[in-house]
Amino acid sequence: MSNKIVYPYIPNSTNSAKQKMMDTLGITSIDELYVAIPDSLRLNRLLNLPDPILSEFELERHVNDLLNKNISTNEVISFLGSGCYNHYVPAICDEINSRNEFLTAYSGKTYEDHGRYQALFEFQSMMADLLNMDVVALPTYDGLQAAASALRMAIDITRRNKILVSKNISPEKISKIYDFLGSHVQIKLIDFDQDTGELSLDSLSINLNREVAAIFFDNPNFFGIIERNGEEIASLAHKFDALCVVSVDPISLGILKPPADYGADIVCGDIQSLGMHMQCGGGQAGFIAVHDDPKFIMEIPLRIYGIVPTIEKGEYGFGEIAIDRTSLMSREKGKEWVGTMANLWGITAAVYLATLGKKGIIEIGKLILSNTHYAYKAITNLPNLKAKFSNNYIFREFVVDFSNTSYSVSEINNQLLKKKIFGGYNLTGQIENCDNCAVYCITEIHSEQDIDLLVNSLEEIVQ
C-alpha cells in the first residue's frame, strides 16, 4: 500500500482506512482482488501519470487551461451535425431541468416523486402524439442504444437471429449495433443506391427471407436524405413476417410523415434536438416507441410510466407499469439494464415540445427545410463543387463532394476554421465511395448571412 498521498476528497485513501477494508475482506494485498484477471491482460507496472494536483485552486486553474483549448459553437459558426445538432434551446428548458427537484432527483416512488413521474408521463404522451405511436418508454442513454435495443426487441419478438441494416446510417450506429447484439446475431449490411443515397430495394429484396427478424434504416438517413420508399420497405419486411424498425429525429416530424404511418413496427431515435445543448459526453438521450400490442410492450427493456384515477374524483396518479420485465425487479432476468438513465433529458424534451406546441414543431421543420435547401443550392452551384447524391429530398443535412477540387476535406475544414467556421463532417474513410466528401448540417439557427459566409468562404478556398 502507498502511504505517500491522502487525497482530500477520498477519505478512504488513508493508510488506516485501506488496511481496515483489506482486513474486512480477509486479504493482505490489493493484488488479491485481481486474481481472476489473467497475467497476460495485466499492465504489471504503474501508469505513466503526472503527479497529482492536490490544491483545489491549482486543479481548477489546470482544468480551465485545458477547457480553454476548446473552441465552442458560441465562438464560431458550426455546420457540423451527424448525430449531435446545434439547435436553438429555449431558456425555459434550462430553467426547468436545473430545478433541484428534477436535477438532483434519483429514483423514488410514486408517492414521493409525483411531479417527476407526471413530467415524464407528459414526455411519453407528447412523443407518442408526435410519432403516432401508442407507447413510448423513458429515455435510453442515447439514440445509438435505442437503435440497438429496438433490434434486440425485434429478435426476441420474432425468435429469429438475423438483422438487415442499411449501410447509409452512421458508422457509430453500425458499431453500436454490432457491439450490442453480439457475435451470436447475424447482421447483414444492405447497400444504398449510389445515385440517390437511399436504401437499395434490390439489395434488400435479395437478402430478405424468413430468417430475418427485422429491417433497420434511418429516415432521414445519415446523408440527410429522406427515404421515400419507407412504405415499400415495410411492406417487403412484413411479407416475410419480419419487423420494420425505423430511427427518426423527432424534430423532423413537423413536416415529415411519422414512420408508423408507413408501416414501422418499432420506432426509435435520439431526442437531443428537442431542447438539449451540444455537449461533450452528454446531452444525448434515445427513445423507443411501439404500438399498443402487449407482445411489443413487454419486450421494451425500459421503464414506462402510466396514469390511473385515484379514489378522489378528478385526481390522477402516475406510476410505473409492467416493471417486472426490467432489471429493477430482477437483475438477472431483466430485458436489459435500466436505471435513471437520461430521465432529466426526457423532462427537458417535454418542456421543449410543450413550449413549441403543434404549430411550433411544424414551423421549425419548415424553417430547417428552407435553410437546408438554400444552402444546398448555393454550395452545389459553386464551380468544382457538387452534391454527392442526385436526390434533393433532404432535411437538415446533405453531402458535398470535393473530389473535383485540389483540396482534401481536412484541408478545407482547416481553412474554414481560420475563418471561424466549423465545416462539414468528413466522410473520408467512413463511408464507402464517399472519400473527399463531407456532410453539412443546416438548422434553424443559421441565418442567411451565416450560410452566405460559408458559401463565400468555400468559393474563396477552392477557386
Image: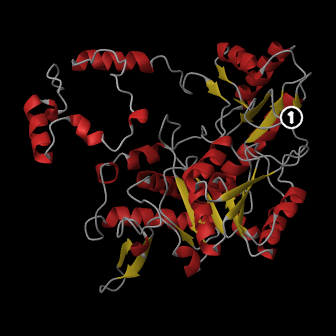
Give the residue at the far front of this rendering: 39
Between 362 and 190, the residue placed more toward the observer is 190
Q: Residue at x 10, y 29 (%)?
A: 15
Between 18 and 350, the residue placed more toward the observer is 18
Question: Label 1, on which residue?
Answer: 377
Q: In the displayed structure, does residue 336 sit left or right of residue 453?
A: left
Q: Residue at x 53, y 25 (%)?
A: 72
Q: Residue at x 10, y 35 (%)?
A: 19
Label 1 secondary element: helix
Disc 1 crowd rating (10 Å Cα; few below 14, some 14-19, many 20+) is few
The colour scheme of the drawn protein is: secondary structure
Q: Position of residue 423 (x, y in %)?
A: 70, 25
Q: Position of residue 279 (x, y in %)?
A: 50, 36
- Location of the N terminus (image quadrant): top left
Q: Is residue 356 visible?
A: no
For the image shown, how many numbered marks are present on the structure? Answer: 1
Residue 146, by quadrant, is: bottom right
Q: Is residue 313 visible?
A: yes
Q: Position of residue 185 (x, y in %)?
A: 64, 59
Residue 334, by quadrant, is: bottom left
Q: Is residue 8 above or below residue 343?
A: above
Residue 239, by quadrant, is: bottom right
Q: In the displayed structure, does residue 41 sit left or right of residue 100?
A: right
User: For the residue marked with disc 1, what is the amino acid?
Assistant: Lys
Q: Is residue 364 above or below residue 312?
A: above
Q: Position of residue 28 (x, y in %)?
A: 14, 37
- Location of the C terminus (image quadrant): top right
